Every structure is written in structure tokens, then in C-alpha cells.
Image (cartoon, rainbow, N blue to C red):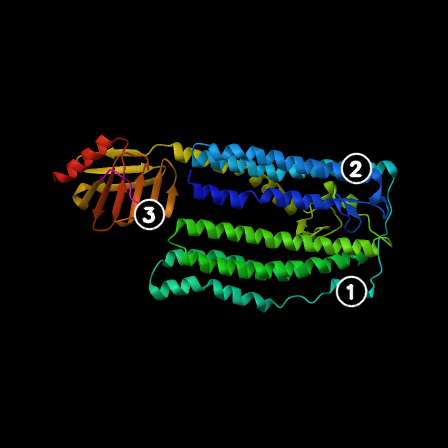
Amino acid sequence: MDNLFMFFILICCYPVLPVISLLLANETKPKENIVLGVTLPPGRQEEPAVKDICAGYRKKLRNGAIVLTLLLLPVFFLPSFSVMLTAWLCWLLLIICVPFVLYVMAHLQLKALKQANEWFGGVAKRAVTDITVTAALQKPLPHWLFLPAFGISLLPLLIAYLINQDQIYAATITMSCGSIILLSLFSYPFILRQKDNGGDDNILINLASTGARLYQWGKCWLFLSYLTALFAVTMWFVRNSDGGILFTVALYTLAAMALCFHAELNARKAQEKLTAQYGEKQYVDEDAFWPLGMFYDRPDDRRFFINKRVGIGVTLNLARPGAKVLTGLSLLILAALPLIGVVAIYEEYTPITVTAGEEGVRVGHLGFEIIVDYDDVDEAALLYELPDLTRLNGTAMDTVEKGEFAVAGYGVCRICIDPQAAAFLVLKTAKDTYLISTPSKGETEQIYRWLEGR
């Protein structure tokens, strides 16, 4: 497996593990009197039994991260791209599931402790103080700040049409990045409309932490917009370099993750501070509406999206039928991730089919097909070494490469080859240039002799 691609996969995928572990470990710090998704009365958060549960949970998270890291090492020695991809996807599923399973176990343990000691209480409503209003009503960012980022993302498309090169590539980059920026622009007003989680009640810490959440959301979306615009421009200038493209995507992924992680931690720190300042006075216990501490299920709440109790982001109200369907589909898609790798294995290990005769040749692979009539061939070349290839669109694996590629010395070609073949044919017609291979060197040479003899 290409070392550059391995580096790309490692840079983009591995940080998911420490990010998830750190965020879930942060759940042991009281925010709005909530520890591990369980609301505890002020003062009970420092109980030795609570501390022991939190310490044991953090230790299991650390040990789990170490074990999952060790499980990753054999992936680098797998024989092919598709097998490695399948292993990576299974590993990604593990690093998402294992930390959350540990969280649920600790949550249930702490909830049982709370029930055994009857640590219940809280009030249904809270008065709104001037300090709370100030915290909750931080001035939102102007929406027009997102527009320059969208304009910058259009530069690759503008340059491509001015120089009349790579318009399709530029349009793809611009549409992808522009969509992310527009999503940021439209998502920010949406989150500004999200209210506190107390139903119709204005609750002290809840309202204040909502203001902190909105402020961090706004900065995160705005910075992500300009990061995406910079990514679009950079992708245009490195378009002819596979290494440059992989490196740019890796940096963008890491930077986007860092932005979200920074915003999440800042929101949680604000909630911790509010809890320390006002949590001793009054608090709300809504654990009955938050099964497992992370889901929301309240039939008398008509809202579909609900602010998370801790940090930033929204969750679904599972009391709504549509939310149940959406959650089920999301879990199904997550569980099906390894199937992508299974499909890749099938594609990589399905051999190319070749039908050659004295009139023409047909080369195909799983729906992709190249048919060349020898009478249409203006020029043919027999190669015993594969030229440098740059994929424009299609598939590139260890045992099959198909689609449209830039081929050194021959320009843009439609290809369908086994890169490990001993010989290759370049067939140039009036419309297209093709690069093909057959299962054997002798068969490839035979086709070339037929062409030479015509």
C-alpha cells in the first residue's frame, strides 16, 4: 500500500479516537450539576463514591484507547487497499462504540448510586437574573460575515474558466466547498432559534449556558467557512499532485476537527463556570427525560431538535416519531460502514474480463467497459512498463484501475487495466485514447500483432 495514502488515512482517522475519549472523559466534570449524564444535588458531586465511579470510568477510557490503538497496528500490514479499508472502517466503528459503551456503563452505575441514596431534588422553574440575561443574550455574529468566504470558494471556478482548464474539477471543488459554507450560513440562524431545554420555563443556568453554546457555535461555523474557502483555493493549486491533494485534505480534516473540539471545550468550560457560580443556589433535575444521559425523550415537548444539556450541538426528541426513524437510520448507516469495505474487496478481487478477436477487443470490469474496433485504431503501442498515471475519475486499486486517467506521454485516456500485468496496450482512435491490459502477456502481444498486421 502506498505510504502516502497510509499517512493520509492515519492523519484523518486516528484523531477521532483521542477526540472522542477526551470529550467523554470531560463528562466527569460537573456542568449544570450534571456528571456523566446524571443530575446530582450540589455537594454530592464531591462524594467519594461519585469520585470513584468517575475515576474508574476515566481509567477504562484510557485503557480502551490504548487497546484500540494497538488493534490499529496490524492494519498497516494488510495486503491490499480494499482489505485495509475494511479493517479501517471496522476500527472506526469500534472507536465510536467502545467509548460510548463505557460511558453508558458509568452512567448507569452513577444513576444507581443516586437512586440508592435518594439524591433527588431541584426546582421546576428558576428566576432570571440580570447576570443570566447578559450571559444568555450575547450579541450574535452578523450573518454577512459568512458571505466573503463563499466568494473566496468561487475563485477556482473563476480561474478555471478564465484559463479554460480543468473546469469539471474546479466545479466539483467549488460546489462541494460552497455547499459546506452555505450550510454554515444557514445553520447559524437555525441554532440561534434554539431555546433552552426547560420547555416553557426560563431556567437560570440552562439559559446562561445556552448563550455560551450559541456564541461558540457561531465562531465555529464562521471559522469553518473561511477554512473551507481556503481549502477550495488550495485544492485548485495542488490539483496535479496526488501528494498535495492528500496532504491538503488531511490538514483540512485536522483543522476542522480542532475547530469543533475547541468550540466544544469552550462551551463546556463556560457551563462548568456557571455551575460553580450558581449551581449551589438551585438546579433542575430532568434525568427522567434523558435516558442513558445522552438521548432526549419527552412527549409533552413538541420540539424536534433539542439543545444538548452539555457542550454544544443539538439532539433529537425521541418522543417524535420522525426522530425515532432518523435515529434508527443513522444507527443503521453507522453499523453498515464495514460493508463499504466489503464492496471494495469484491471490486478489487473481481478479475478484468477480456474478449479479444481479430476484429476488436472488449475489456470490462463490473459495469465499466471499453470496446475498440481495430478498424478505428489510428495508432497502437505495446508497453512493458506502466507509465505514470494520475486518476481524474474512476477506480484505482492494486489489482484494477479503470476510468479516466492522465497517462504520461499519452494525455487523457480511458483505461481498464490490472496494474500488475506484464504488458499493456495503448490504442489511439479519432475520438479517444485507451490503455488496456489482458490476463496474459502473450494475449496482449497477440492483439498488438493483429493491429500491426492490418
Farthest residue to the left: give it. Answer: 453
- Count of numbered circles on the image: 3
Q: Which residue is mark 1?
A: 133
Amino acid, disc 3: Phe
The answer to whether mark 1 and mark 3 are in CB contact below 8 A is no
Q: Residue at x 65, y 46 (%)?
A: 323
What is the span of residues highlighted in magenta in the rendered image? 383-391
| Residue at the (51%, 42%) spot, across then down | 10
Residue 145, image quadrant: bottom right
Residue 360: percent from the left, percent from the top? 20, 38
The crowding category of the residue bearing disc 3, from other C-alpha atoms within 10 Å (few below 14, some 14 to 19, many at least 20), is: many
The answer to whether residue 371 is above or below residue 279 is above
Q: CA distance from mark 1 to mark 2?
A: 36 Å
Q: Residue at x 66, y 45 (%)?
A: 22
Left or right, residue 336 beside residue 406: right
Per the image, label 1 sits on a secondary structure element best described as helix
- Please indicate, yes or no, whether residue 83 appears anywhere in the rendered image: yes
